[in-house]
């Protein structure tokens, strides 16, 4: 069978594989039943639905021809590296890493770092626009996670708060 839409086919494969992985991972927890759901019930259900959606997208890509064939272009390495790197740095700064003597820098610093690093993936990166976005995200995250939900994690760097 010939692939008629590469973009749909590969996105369907991604959904299918991720759905199977989530469903499989959920089997490590108690599933329960509809009346008494265990901690693995929702991830199993969500993973199964995701895999089904992926399978439907794969079938669509194999059966229906798209207008331009939806060819897959070359990998966008710059945005890929910046986005993955930004998330990695966010995790390191939020909690720190004792094995390399990196203290926790807290939520606010981690959000600013995440926003600045991820925004550099753009070709037309602007400092002021990124600063305003980082400030809005930091304030919004503080209000939602710390004030409204009262989650317990470092907000400010350890060397400031002690």
Image (spheres, rainbow, N blue to C red):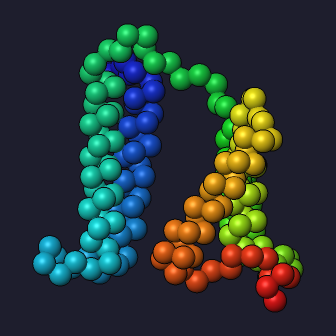
Left or right of residue 100: residue 70:
left
Q: Is residue 44 visible?
A: yes
Q: Is residue 78 visible?
A: no
Residue 137: horizontal and vertical position, in percent?
62, 56
In this rendering, is residue 94 above or below 12? Answer: below
Image label count: 0
The quadrant in which the C terminus is found is bottom right
Front residue (pair 101, 157): 157
Residue 155: horizontal and vertical position, in percent?
69, 76
Q: Which residue in the rendered view is the most extreme toward the top?
A: 67
In this rendering, is residue 151 above or below 116? Answer: below
* Corner quadrant of residue 127: top right
Left or right of residue 69: residue 36:
left
In this rendering, is residue 66 above or below 84? Answer: above
What's the residue at 58%, 83% (across, down)?
152
Residue 144: horizontal and vertical position, in percent?
52, 68
The quadrant in which the N terminus is found is top left
* Corner quadrant of residue 10: top left
Residue 36: horizontal and vertical position, in percent?
17, 81
What's the residue at 44%, 43% (across, down)?
14
Left or right of residue 85: residue 70:
left
Front residue (pair 152, 140): 140
What's the residue at 45%, 27% (across, down)?
7
Q: Which residue in the rendered view is the most extreme toward the bottom?
A: 162
Front residue (pair 6, 149): 149
Front residue (pair 53, 63): 53
Q: Which residue in the rendered view is the most extreme toward the left?
A: 35
What's the residue at 28%, 19% (across, down)?
64
């Amino acid at each position: 069978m010939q692939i008629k839409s590469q973009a749909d086919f590969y996105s369907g494969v991604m959904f299918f594989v991720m759905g199977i992985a989530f469903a499989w991972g959920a089997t490590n927890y108690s599933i329960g039943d509809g009346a008494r759901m265990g901690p693995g019930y929702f991830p199993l259900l969500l993973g199964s639905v995701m895999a089904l959606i992926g399978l439907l997208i794969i079938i669509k890509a194999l059966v229906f021809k798209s207008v331009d064939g939806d060819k897959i272009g070359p990998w966008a390495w710059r945005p890929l590296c910046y986005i993955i790197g930004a998330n990695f740095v966010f995790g390191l700064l939020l909690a720190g890493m004792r094995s390399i003597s990196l203290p926790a820098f807290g939520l606010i610093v981690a959000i600013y770092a995440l926003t600045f690093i991820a925004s550099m993936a753009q070709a037309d990166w602007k400092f002021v626009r990124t600063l305003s976005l980082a400030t809005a995200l930091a304030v919004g995250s503080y209000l939602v996670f710390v004030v409204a939900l009262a989650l317990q994690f470092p907000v400010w760097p350890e060397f400031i708060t002690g």
